[in-house]
Image (cartoon, grey):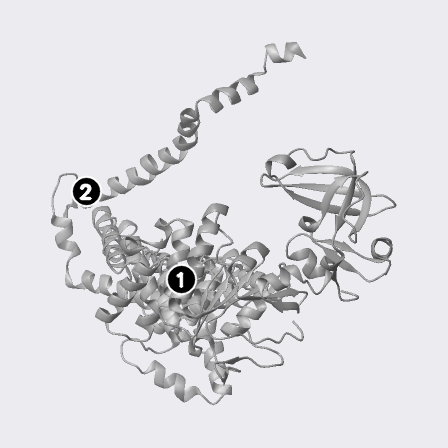
Amino acid sequence: MSATFAQPSLGSRISTKLYLHPKLLLLLLLAPPLLWLGVIYLGSLFALLLQSFFYIDEFSGNIVREFSLVTYEQLFTRANADIFIRTTLMAAAVTIAAAVIAFPLAYYMVRYASMKMKAALYLAVMLPLWSSYLVRVYAWKLILAKEGIVPWFAAKLHLTWLLEVVLSIPVIGGPSLSISYIGSFLVFLYIWLPFMILPIVAALERVPASLTEASADLGATPAQTFRKVILPLAFPGVVAGSIFTFSLTLGDYIIPGIIGNSRPFIGQAVYQLQGTAGNIPLAAAFTIVPIVIMAIYLTAARRLGAFDAL
Amino acid sequence: MDGVSFEIQDGEFFSMLGPSGSGKTTCLRLIAGFEQPDAGSIVIHGANVEGVPPYRRDVNTVFQDYALFPHLSVMENVEYGLMIRKVAPAERRRRSQEMLGLVKLEAMGARKPNQLSGGQRQRVALARALINRPSVLLLDEPLGALDLKLREQMQEELKSLQRQVGITFIYVTHDQGEALAMSDRLAVFNRGRIEQIGAPAQIYEHPATAFVAGFVGVSNVCTGELAQRLTGSGQAFAIRPEKIIMTAASDPGPPGWLSVTGRVRAVTYHGATTRYSVAVDGGGELAVMRQNAAESLNAAQAGDAVRLAWPRQLNQPLAEGA
């Protein structure tokens, strides 16, 4: 026994060393994520930012590697501005709709559902995330297409006229649901909804039921309790969810490519510019736009007090 | 809960005492309106409140976990009830400042609840519940989370606050000492029923059932064979440990008193008092409590033969089957 104590194994010596030097342990634990974030993630982001200040020579098609704002001049043309506005409006609409749908479901899950029901609902929310994104988007194409499930069902219910009224709405309508902004909106909403539900559930879990009772006890009707207590306390969850839905919609290029009219979104523009057009500087400049929009969005959310209750 | 029926006087400090799961908190929640009775009725100031939601009842609650709104400042928490009633901001400020003064937290209005200590939070919860000037204030184990010293201090403050504002307090607690010290009257709950209602001294001195005798303070509950041997009748009774006099076994004991010999089994020192567990000759055990006045120090050791004696009239007969 004494021999074991006198000569501890290498593993035990390392353990002791780390236990006595917690800072060394911290350094070892943080090195991989810091390298990943600092070098690979932020590094490539800066490389991207840098690219956007180069420009492409129109005659040779070569990238000119010197500082200029030529690319940004190209970025702010009328056609490109339309892309930004279109994408931002879509992202905003998807985010608001997702919040409106997700909140009651999350509230039900936290306050009313039994343990079994809650587990089932969690599963129902997460299940779509386990299957291929592309398969789900193409499935929606079948649902929304002119000969698809929705028009078929509308016909069975003698509601074809209603579908036609909806499709005849200017701008957001179109020849069929799968070739309209309404279609892209529905699919975006479906795909990103779990990312809104889960953070709201997490936020509501942290609001004790006694706060609702205290509010009622002090004379607040359920509507007042919702406005003054539940919503402010769950708001950080809504903002966290909206960061997902908003930024994911801003950057997505697959959904609008499969479902929607052929007017491009930011993601598609970036995809085309860096691929077929080979205009890396403009693609980079395009990528900066969602970053700027998100920065503005988060600043506004902070001003609204979204992070006060954190 | 079953067959729970009682009436509370205006301005009374009424406690509901009982172990956890005895129905006292359910009873409080029924009065507050968080739960609805399956049968029976609740009348507050002459108005039957059946089907009336909590926000329309003239009753406010101090919650066990205080339930302060974490996103609002202390001042905004206290003002909440007035804000809901759309009282003008200036009036709101004035009254909430007054309430904070009442609970001695004038300077804390701008803080958030998480910057306060447990005792301070408790006071904020109190101020918030009192600002609506309810006809009844419900308190659900409000001192449960505080340490002993602070709890004793808050007991006194609560009691004097109640006298000051003159509002009926209905106080739920599982701490019998607290209930005895604070209440005008108390109800002892057990398994969803009320075992006894009365003033603290009445409950302590004259417990009606074995449960009350055992739950409120410490009692020697004597039943069956032991009762038979001590008194000559099988009637169950309770005797408080501090009523029993302990002398040497050879001492005959005061004439006319009940008396029994035994051997000290264990001695537990409690500071002001010492508790002796005495194994009675012939079976059974009695607890004896002695004040630690100078002469009584080390009055008996474990193993000593002693005589226990007490006046017969101090026996509290207990209801059968309880």
In the image, what residue occupies the spot 63% across and 74% down? B4
Residue A270 horizontal/vertical position (percent): 28, 53
Q: Chain of mark 2?
A: A
Q: Nearer the viewer, residue B6 or A180?
A: B6
Residue density around tag 1, few if under 14, some if 14–19, many if 20 or more, within 10 Å? some
Give above or below for A49 relative to B215: above
Q: Which residue is mark 2?
A: A63
Q: Amino acid at mark 2?
A: Ile
The mark total stands at 2
Query: Can you give x and y, in whole percent of width and height, for residue A13 in the image?
Result: 53, 17
Q: Nearer the viewer, residue B132 or B5?
A: B5
Which residue shows up at 67% across the image and 33% down it?
Answer: B298
Q: Is residue A133 above or below residue A166?
A: above
- Side (left or right) of B91 relative to B293: left
Work out whether residue A165 can be spotted: yes
Say what secondary structure mark 1 lies in.
Answer: helix
Spatial separation of the CA atoms under disc 1 and disc 2: 80 Å
User: Which percent across, then down, holds residue A69?
Assistant: 12, 47
Q: Chain of mark 1?
A: B
Report the residue at 36% width, 71% height from top. B132
Viewer-nearest of discs 1 and 2:
1
The residue that disc 1 covers is B161
Q: Residue at x 17, y 43 (%)?
A: A54
- Which of the pair B150/A86 is nearer the observer? B150
Residue B105 vertical placement versus B23 (above, below): above
Task: Give SS at disc 2.
Answer: strand
Q: Are marks 1 and 2 in contact (CB under 8 Å)?
A: no
Residue A103 falls in image quadrant: bottom left
- The quarter of the image holding the N terminus of chain A is top right
Pick the front one: B74 or A88: B74
In the picture, measured across the screen, residue A218 lies left or right of residue A275, that is right
Left-right relation of A273 to B176? left
